[in-house]
Image (spheres, grey):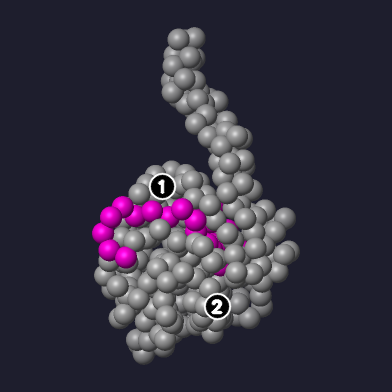
Amino acid sequence: MLPAGGGTVRVAKAGVVGAGTMGAAVAELLAFNGIDVVLKDVDGPTVEKGLEKIRGIVAELVRFHAERAGKEIERVTREAGPLSEAQLGRLREALAPKFGRPQGDEVIARVHGVTEYAAFADVDLVIEAVFEREEVKRPVLEALDRVLPPRTVIGSNTSSLSITRLARGLSHRRETLVTHFFNPPYALPLVELSGGVETREDVLTETIQFFGGLRNHRSPLVPIRVKEAPAFVVNRLLMPMINEACFALDEQVASPRDIDVAMKTGAGMPMGPFELADMIGLDVVLEVTETLYRDFGDPKYRSAPALRRMVGAGRLGRKTGQGFYEYPG
């Protein structure tokens, strides 16, 4: 568990509330690091969808390791010509799968789907990963507050909301903090952590230490401490850029595809703003931009009409199969 002060940070069992895209991926990340996880949502079918997402994430990792040597040999051969048997042997040995189906099955077995908060009665850490609205998150935190042991730490995956306001009046308010992951957390290592007015300093520092000891599928996690401020660091910079791309679309400066191509080939971005918005979820982008506008009162943060239209039409990006682009299947 996360101790009250000092000592080695330990989490034997964790919980995640919200079995959507982010919640399922966070549960997989914790299980990948050897931690037993209970994953909760409102009903059995929704939980099962989350578990299916986890099975898909694990299957993708198994496939990557199985195919890595062959793809690298193909690339090297294409660029440098045929390799000797000795060279092929060394490459295959160096790139032998380090994560196979047995390890994948172990990860999957560590995640247990539930629909009741009673299953959280013995967890050491909970990550709340429900929709980015205070009226959705607050009842979840209140329900957790009633069942958790006194020293359990609650991390909210909010990307923009005040943790002081979310935790106000909870008996766990001193153990509650922001743990903001980035999608997908099994590939992106950053975690923004922020305490509220009443968050204990040792809870914040030891949670940072805990996440610093984990790794995702590619690298160690990178936890950073941020001040409690609207949208923290990344989203305060990123969401206005996406929103400005939507304004450019409204003004018919260029098509979504051409704007994305321009930002990738001219600004060095790995993904264009519309590709990224579709991956994040346009409802999340809108919610963060509206939070920035509300909390700062600055018209530069006002939401673009194109963004509001897309969300109003239910075209939320990859998770609905339609956003600025189409995603068949």
Q: Dot 2, crowdedness within 10 Å: few (<14), some or many (≥20)?
A: few
User: Quick check: is 27 in the magenta stretch?
Assistant: yes
- Mark 1 or mark 2: whose residue is earlier in sequence: 2
Estimate the spatial distance between the alpha carbons at disc 1 and disc 2, rounded to whole Å.
Answer: 30 Å
Toward the viewer: 161 or 311? 161
Q: Which residue is at a point 31% across and 60% down the rendered structure image?
A: 206
The spot of residue 314 in percent (x, y) is 66, 75
Q: Which residue is at a point 55% across and 81% down the rendered structure image?
A: 139
Kindly identify which residue carries mark 2.
Answer: 143
Which circle, 1 or 2, is nearer the viewer? 2
Q: Amino acid at mark 2?
A: Ala
Q: Which residue is at a point 44% across and 23% down the rendered structure image?
A: 94
Q: In the rendered view of the protein, which quadrant contains the N terminus?
A: bottom left
The spot of residue 284 in percent (x, y) is 52, 73
Mark 2: secondary structure: helix
Residue 272 in sight from this viewpoint: no
Q: Quadrant of residue 51?
A: bottom right
Kindly identify which residue carries mark 1.
Answer: 215
The spot of residue 36 in percent (x, y) is 53, 52
* Residue 15 vertical placement versus 287 (above, below): above
Q: Dot 1, crowdedness within 10 Å: few (<14), some or many (≥20)?
A: some
> Which residue range is magenta in the image?
4-30
Toward the viewer: 157 or 233? 157
The spot of residue 209 in percent (x, y) is 31, 56
